Amino acid sequence: SLDAETGLGADAFVRLDRGRVRGELAAFRYGIDGYIFPSSRGRADRGRQGQFRAQYTNEDLRLTGAEARLGVDLTRYVVLDVVGSVVRGRFTSDRAPIPVFDGTDTTFVAASQYPPLLPPPRARVALRH
């Protein structure tokens, strides 16, 4: 009974090529209505293979991110490469509190405003010959 995911976004990028120095910067921002993701919804039971069970659900989300790449020819045979990227997300819809079941008692905790399954920020520096 999930709603369809729909979204609207924008991408922008700039490239530089000056012989020995090359670079690119790209950025994006997307609004996604009905983003589909797994949620425990407070359950702590496990499935057959020992993983926590999850229920897929919909929430509205905003994603923002950027990637940068720089290449510099240090010598005729050695190139410095630097790459980095980051993605940030935040739910934009009101989120229901999550019930936490403890025996016969149920308490409610605030749902996170940050979606699961986003990649961590990453960076790489390399020398190539």
Image: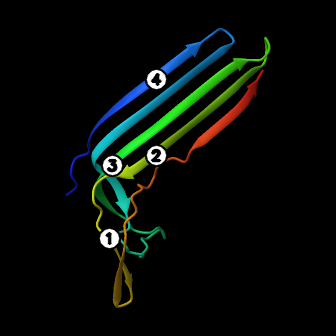
Q: Amino acid at mark 2?
A: Arg
Q: Amino acid at mark 4?
A: Phe
Instruction: Tell me the tag on residue 97.
Output: 1
State the residue position of label 4.
13
How far, Cα to Cα, is label 4 from label 1? 39 Å
- Dots 2, 4 in contact, CB < 8 A: no
Q: Position of residue 11 (x, y in %)?
A: 39, 28
Q: Amino acid at mark 3?
A: Leu
Q: Amino acid at mark 1?
A: Pro
SS type, badge 2: strand
How far, Cα to Cα, is label 2 from label 4? 18 Å
How far, Cα to Cα, is label 4 from label 3? 23 Å
Which residue appears farthest toward the bottom when viewing the image? 104
Q: Position of residue 38 (x, y in %)?
A: 37, 59
- Name which of mark 1 and mark 2 comes first in the sequence: 2
State the residue position of label 2.
88
- Name which of mark 2 and mark 4 comes first in the sequence: 4
Instruction: Tell me the tag on residue 66.
Output: none
**Could you tell whether 75 is left or right of 16 in the image?**
right
Instruction: Tell me the tag on residue 61.
Output: 3
SS type, badge 1: loop
How far, Cα to Cα, is label 1 from label 2? 22 Å
- Name which of mark 4 and mark 3 comes first in the sequence: 4
The structure residue drawn at horizontal position 68% and vertical position 26%, both measured from the top left corner, is 81
